[in-house]
Amino acid sequence: MKCPFCHNVRNHVIDSRLSKDAHTIRRRRACEKCGRRFTTYERVEEVLPVVVKKDGRREAYDRQKVLAGLKKACEKRPVSTAAIEQAVDRIELQLQERGEKEVPSTLIGEAAMRELHRLDQVAYVRFASVYREFKDVDEFMRELQRLMKDRHKGRVKRRQRGS
């Protein structure tokens, strides 16, 4: 591991901890040349499926692409980076559990929408408007009405459980 400050490759681990989700190891390191400390994260490299795009092209799954899409949707919203990372972790877990070599891009898009729906409804609508390529305001309004209807159902269910 190269020091991000002086680029020396000689360093030692000061502390290692397993993340809460038990999928990542956080390591604190100290550079043997400059003495500065830095953190690295280690995760098992899972074999994820090839993504089949709408036009038939195939490309390797790219975590950063999914992460960037969710971050963009959550921009200026009260959603932590950690929550977004966990959402991407759940999407990847779903892909791995399928055990398929190829998955359609729509599967990833729908999973991202489910995660955003759970995290932040404004972010969900932002993502949906781009992902579903709304043609006009009417389509957009139908999606908002569906969201409001789902939200109302959720409140009614919570009230019923609370009684």
Image (spheres, helix red, strand yellow):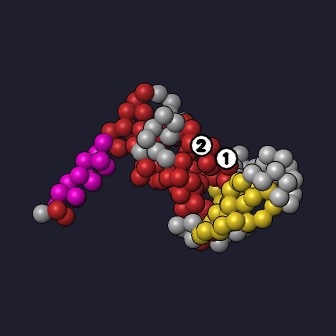
Task: Assign a secondary structure to mark 2.
Answer: helix
Residue at the far left: name it.
163
Residue 65's disc number: 1
Residue 7: tell me if it is visible: yes
Residue 158 magenta: yes
The correct choice, above or below, for 4 with respect to 96 in the image is above
Residue at the location (64% across, 63% down)?
A: 26
- Describe residue 96's horizontal placement relative to residue 133 as left or right: right
Give the residue type at disc 2.
Gly
- The quadrant of the picture occupied by the N terminus is bottom right
Front position in the image: 80 or 131: 80
Which amino acid type corresponds to the residue marked 1 in the rendered image? Lys
Image coords of residue 76 (percent x, y)? 48, 34
Image quadrant assignment for residue 160: bottom left
Disc 1: CA contacts within 10 A as few (<14), some (14-19) or many (>=20): few
Q: Horizontal and vertical percent for residue 96?
A: 63, 68
**Pointer 1 with pointer 2, Cβ within 8 A:** yes
Q: Taking 154 as reference, is 67 left or right?
A: right
Residue that label 2 marks: 69
Mark sitting on residue 27: none
How far is the residue under mark 1 from the one under mark 2? 6 Å
- Chief secondary structure of the magenta span? helix
Residue 17 coordinates in the image, percent (x, y):
61, 68
| Magenta region, residue range | 148-160
**Quadrant including the C terminus:** bottom left
Q: Tell me where residue 37 appears, x and y as whole percent.
A: 71, 54
Badge 2 crowding class, 10 Å Cα cut-off, few under 14, some 14 to 19, many 20 or more, is: some
Compared to 132, does 44 lie above or below?
A: below
